[in-house]
Amino acid sequence: MTDGPTQDLAGRRAAVTGAGSGIGAAIAEAFATRGAHVIAVDVNAEAAAATAQRTGGEAWVVDLADTAGLREAHLDVDILVNNAGIQHVSPVEEFDPDRFHLILMLMLEAPFLLARAALPHMYERGFGRIINISSVHGLRASAFKSAYVSAKHGLEGLSKVIAQEGAGRGVTSNCLNPGYVRTPLVEAQIADQARVHGIPPERVVSEILLERSAIKELIEPAHVADLACWLASPAAAMVTGSSYTMDGGWTAR
């Protein structure tokens, strides 16, 4: 018999963006089991409320792509997980500029503004964890994903800058770089990839998404949440400015 998860996040306040589903929901739930008070951040009010109810936390319904509304924000949290994201698959010459701009606002500018809002409180307490859910596409590129790859590469740089500035003040900043995770975002890509590559949807996972992976399985959100819990914990106090791949060997080739 085990005693259940350690309570190493007890007393901590954690904001998780995109917490209504997928990776964000898994991280929010894992944090709550370790004692954290979770702020479930999502544009979908119903989904945010559901996660808040499951975790015993609170919901913050906000459109993070509306970055003007975040410029004067103040975020009283000990842990910030920048996870919210969207995807669009298209060749560069056909990529809608407005869609490109939207993805960069949501996945790069919003994490900057949220970190900017949270850091003063973290510095005051001498403790903070910023965990940026990047991607293998923050380290490598794939065709037809210009906005996503650009945003994730920018997030990697932002994370390292915060790591440098937070050093000695108890604040760490790291990227978590999963490959293809079994989430609604990835499942929505299958039809897009089938269209772009001209193959049936059932062939996309093995031939396109996991073609470069040594392990031919989609990652589960709980796997990502377990690593996020460690990065948020006191045990990771000396880990900062790093990028942790979890990709079934995708980047090993």
Image (spheres, grey):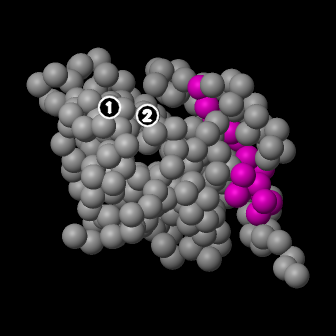
Residue 98 position (above or below residue 90): above
Q: Residue furthest left?
A: 93
Q: Which mark is residue 135?
A: none
- Can residue 38 be seen by looking at this rendering? yes
Q: In the picture, residue 62 is in which quadrant?
A: top right
Residue 203: give x, y in percent of width and height: 32, 46
Residue 241 coordinates in the image, percent (x, y): 40, 65
Choose between 13 and 182: the one closer to the eye: 182
Any magenta on residue 173?
A: no
Q: Quadrant of the N terminus?
A: bottom right
User: Which quadrant, please, contains the C terminus?
Assistant: bottom left
At x 28%, y 26%, the residue is 100
Q: Which of 95 and 130 lies nearest the eye of the viewer?
A: 95
Name the residue rendered at 68%, 49% in the picture: 28
> As displayed, is residue 56 above or below residue 46?
below
Report if residue 121 is visible in the image. Answer: no
Q: Which residue is mark 1?
A: 192
The residue under the point 76% across, 55% down is 32
Residue annotated with mark 2: 188
Circle 1: residue type: Asp
- Please state the horizontal and vertical placement of residue 192, each as a whole percent of the image: 32, 31
Q: Are marks 1 and 2 in contact (CB under 8 Å)?
A: yes
Amino acid type for the residue under numbered disc 2: Ala
Q: Residue 172, position in %: x, y?
A: 51, 63
Q: Is residue 36 in the magenta section?
A: yes
Q: Residue furthest bottom?
A: 1
Which one is nearer the viewer's eye here, 92 or 175?
A: 92
Q: Which residues are magenta?
A: 29-43
Few, some or many residues within 10 Å of mark 1 (<14, 14–19, 20+) = some
Horizontally, is 115 left or right of 161 in the view?
right
Label 2 sits on a secondary structure element that is helix
Residue occupying image coordinates x 68% and y 24%: 45
